[in-house]
Image (cartoon, rainbow, N blue to C red):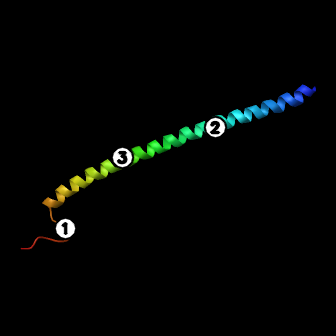
C-alpha cells in the first residue's frame, strides 16, 4: 500500500463520520419538531374532548339529581 492509501482511507472515514453526524443532527431536529407537533395536537384534542364532555355533563346534571342524594318528599 502506498502513502496515499494511508491518508485517503482515514480521510474518507472521517468525512463519512462528519456527514453522518450532520445528517443525524438534522434528523433529530425534525423528529423533535414532529413530536412537539403531535403533543400539541393531542393536547388540543384532549381539551376539545374534555370541553365537550363537560358541556354534556353539565346539561344532564341540571336535569337529574345525583344518585346518592334523592329529592326530598
**In the figure, 51 relative to 70: above or below?**
above
Q: Residue drawn at (81%, 31%), measured in percent from left and top?
A: 11
Residue 67 bears which disc, if any? 1
Local crowd size for mark 1, using a 10 Å CA cut-off: few (<14), some (14–19), many (≥20): few
The residue under label 3 is 44
**In the figure, 41 relative to 2: above or below?**
below
Give the side of residue 12 with respect to residue 64, left or right. Answer: right
Give the side of residue 45 with respect to residue 6, left or right. Answer: left
Relative to the observer, which residue lies in front, 26 or 59? Answer: 26
Local crowd size for mark 2, using a 10 Å CA cut-off: few (<14), some (14–19), many (≥20): few
**In the figure, 50 relative to 12: above or below?**
below
Residue 20 figure quarter: top right
Measured from the top left, where is residue 35 in percent x and y? 49, 44
Measured from the top left, where is residue 61 in percent x and y? 18, 60
Which residue is outermost to the right? Answer: 2
**In what element is the residue under mark 2?**
helix
Amino acid at each position: 500500500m502506498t502513502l496515499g492509501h494511508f491518508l485517503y482511507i482515514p480521510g474518507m472515514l472521517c468525512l463519512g463520520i462528519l456527514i453522518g453526524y450532520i445528517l443525524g443532527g438534522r434528523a433529530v431536529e425534525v423528529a423533535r419538531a414532529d413530536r412537539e407537533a403531535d403533543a400539541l395536537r393531542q393536547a388540543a384534542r384532549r381539551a376539545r374532548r374534555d370541553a365537550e364532555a363537560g358541556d354534556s355533563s353539565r346539561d344532564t346534571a341540571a336535569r337529574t339529581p345525583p344518585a346518592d342524594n334523592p329529592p326530598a318528599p
